[in-house]
């Protein structure tokens, strides 16, 4: 369900691996393009073509499915889950590939036992209807929200998803989800406001500073929720990335410089990544900001944690979606300037970065 960057690339890998797959997209242009030309994926400079068909609705005679992969944008998640629910086999499961905290929404429709999560650790974009670009390598982290790893469906799911990349089964899906959420609240949201690919934006020190502050607010809320954060891709420790009082009072400290170097390295690895929220706005769709930064703001209110920067970002992105603001580096600079007086977990860390590009190469 869903055939954007992630869904289209995933569908291509499954079809090429000879799995029985029904591809559904409510976008008629995408369905028509796939039916006419098949699926096309650009990966590492090479183009791969796969014959396939796509439908705008689940075919009435489709039967029952072991897995329903939900790869829509978050605003279309629940509609897709409702549409596909009648076709889920009694012992089957819906799998959430969205960023954000979406498993609870799907579980409310089909039940906890029929809901699994899959955290995507790679990037892809849709260049044109039915044409996809794999922008970074990686695999998946999968699991139950209750942490049970004994479900045999997880092994089957891991085997299916290995057609795309390596798969890890976790007993702490919530911790992995929150860590990825914190990163996406920065990367996807700032990419939407900045209107450029990640590698270009993260060359600017003030953008990296905004990213650190966004993630710090998200980490503070996760801790208040009692979540034990997991490292992203086994390496990025959000507990370490979050700004500390020492970072606040020592703008040139080795620790703070190391955090900037980490974001430079992330920008280098995912340099071609383009915000899925920006792509959604360009296609006239609702951006997923309420499911990313909005989740942090809502839960921050519930737990008494101030999240002014995430709240401001949500407001700006909605203005972009309404056509009232134009994505640009200048808009990001304005966001940075206006947020210096906000009160929150990073309010004492307002430092006079000038936003000049940094040319130094990231660490290996």
Image: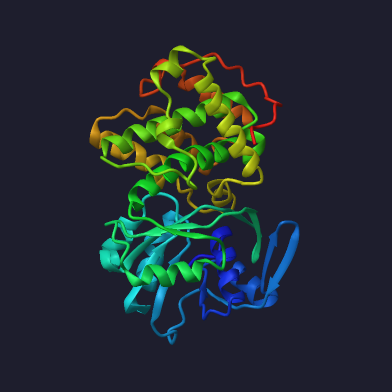
* Numbered label tally: 0
Please tell me which residue lies in front, 80 or 163: 163
Describe residue 334's horizontal placement relative to residue 134 as left or right.
left
Query: In this image, 336 relative to 87: left or right?
Result: right
Left or right for 339, reference 306: right
Residue 360's spot in the image, x, y percent?
Answer: 70, 26
- Res 162 visible: yes
Q: Residue at x 35, y 53 (%)?
A: 173
The residue at 64%/36% (across/down) is: 364
Q: Nearer the viewer, residue 111 or 13?
A: 13
Residue 187 sits above or below residue 207 on the image: below
Q: Quadrant of residue 283?
A: bottom right
Q: How is the image coloured?
A: rainbow
* Relative vertical location of residue 190 with respect to residue 281 in this rendering, above or below: above
Residue toward you, 148 or 186: 148
Q: Position of residue 339 (x, y in %)?
A: 46, 22
Residue nearest the viewer, comparing 284 with 69: 69
Residue 225 position, x and y percent, is: 26, 39
Residue at the spot x=44%, y=33% of the render? 215
Q: In the figure, 211 relative to 196: above or below?
A: above
Q: Is residue 327 visible?
A: no
Q: Position of residue 52 (x, y in %)?
A: 62, 77
């Amino acid at each position: 369900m869903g055939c954007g960057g992630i869904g289209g690339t995933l569908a291509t890998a499954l079809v090429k691996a000879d799995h029985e797959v029904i591809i559904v997209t409510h976008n008629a242009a995408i369905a028509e393009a796939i039916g006419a030309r098949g699926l096309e994926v650009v990966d590492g400079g090479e183009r791969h073509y796969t014959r396939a068909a796509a439908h705008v609705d689940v075919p009435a005679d489709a039967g029952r499915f072991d897995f329903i992969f939900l790869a829509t944008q978050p605003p279309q998640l629940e509609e897709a889950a409702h549409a596909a629910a009648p076709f889920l086999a009694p012992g089957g499961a819906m799998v959430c590939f969205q960023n954000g905290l979406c498993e609870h929404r799907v579980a409310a429709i089909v039940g906890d036992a029929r809901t699994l999560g899959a955290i995507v650790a790679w990037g892809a974009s849709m260049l044109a209807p039915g044409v996809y670009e794999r922008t970074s390598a990686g695999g998946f982290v999968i699991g139950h929200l209750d942490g049970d790893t004994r479900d045999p469906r997880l092994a089957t799911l891991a085997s299916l998803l290995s057609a795309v990349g390596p798969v890890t089964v976790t007993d702490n899906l919530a911790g992995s989800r929150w860590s990825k959420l914190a990163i996406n609240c920065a990367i996807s949201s700032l990419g939407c406001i900045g209107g450029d690919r990640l590698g270009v934006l993260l060359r600017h020190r003030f953008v990296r500073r905004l990213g650190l502050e966004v993630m710090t607010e998200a980490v503070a809320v996760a801790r208040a929720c009692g979540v034990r954060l997991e490292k992203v891709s086994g390496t990025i420790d959000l507990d370490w990335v979050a700004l500390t009082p020492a970072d606040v009072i020592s703008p040139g400290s080795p620790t703070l410089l190391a955090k900037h170097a980490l974001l430079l390295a992330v920008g280098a690895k995912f340099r071609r990544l383009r915000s899925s929220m920006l792509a959604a706005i360009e296609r006239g769709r609702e951006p997923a900001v309420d499911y990313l930064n909005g989740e942090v703001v809502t839960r921050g209110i519930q737990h008494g944690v101030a999240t002014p920067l995430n709240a401001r970002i949500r407001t700006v992105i909605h203005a972009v979606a309404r056509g009232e603001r134009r994505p640009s580096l200048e808009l990001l600079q304005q966001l940075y300037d206006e947020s210096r007086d906000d009160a929150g977990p990073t309010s004492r860390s307002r430092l006079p970065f000038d936003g000049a590009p940094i040319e130094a190469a990231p660490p290996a």
